[in-house]
Image (cartoon, helix red, strand yellow):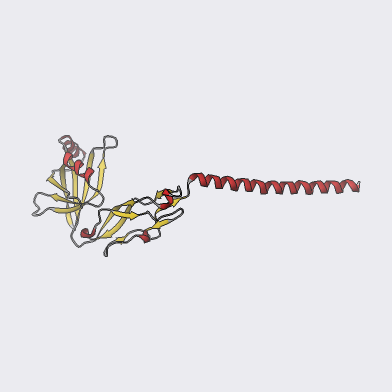
Amino acid sequence: MADARLKTELRDGTGKGVARKLRQDGRVPAVLYGAGQDALHLSLDMHDTMHLFHRISVDNTIVELEVPGEKEEVSTLVREIQTHSWKGTLLHVDFLRIQQGVVVDVDIPVHLVGVPVGVRQNGGILEQTIHDLPIRCIPSLIPEVIEVDVTELDINDVLHVSDLTFDEGVEVAIPLDRTICSVAVPRIEEEEEEAEEEELLEGVEGEAEAEEESEEGEEGSEGGDED
């Protein structure tokens, strides 16, 4: 797991005016809450925080905060990041205080490893459905990434959450029948199959129309004999 630490300062007051002044001074408003303790209103150095967040996986990396008044660094998880809509700068960060041995919910990135046989030999297309997997475990068991070997997947093969293996104590927080990834039939083959089906359908419809016209002709002929 990446080494992630930030220094914080306590901030006086809340509200848009205070937050705006902090950002003008190169700092980011933040809140630390959880573990049954009162929320602390903090501020972070803008440059240091943005640099760290670009370096780590924010969703599942434990960030150690140096907080004034705390004897030791506070272990946290980033719970929410607010950014400027077009500048991309940080506006606010929420940190959840965590405790060793207490279960937390985190999202872990899913990385597919290798090239499926269905892609390299049969021209299939690898489609990834889940990019981040929600899990539940104690902080010491949080994995940095979930690597999935897909080299043996062939055309139409599907890999589900139930096909993954995890360390004891790590619980997946979504149904096990959810699809992680699959190897789809090449698009050109799908189009050819659709074209063949359309031709077959048109042929069947044409035969049916011909039979109907033939029957109508016979009925008209019989009517003429009666006159």
Is 145 left or right of 162, judged from the image as shown?
left
Q: Nearer the viewer, residue 20 or 190?
A: 190
Q: In terms of image quadrants, where is residue 159?
A: bottom left
Q: Position of residue 1 (x, y in %)?
A: 20, 53
Q: Nearer the viewer, residue 213 or 83?
A: 213
Q: Position of residue 219 (x, y in %)?
A: 82, 49
Q: Position of residue 217 (x, y in %)?
A: 81, 46
Q: Nearer the viewer, residue 56 or 66?
A: 56
Is 205 left or right of 15, judged from the image as shown?
right
Q: Residue furthest bottom?
A: 168
Q: Nearer the viewer, residue 114 or 219?
A: 114
Q: In terms of image quadrants, where is residue 30?
A: top left
Q: Residue furthest right?
A: 227
Number of residue marks: 0
Q: Residue furthest front?
A: 121
Q: Residue at x 51, y 46 (%)?
A: 189
Is 112 left or right of 44, judged from the image as shown?
right
Q: Position of residue 44 (x, y in %)?
A: 16, 43
Q: Residue at x 47, y 47 (%)?
A: 186
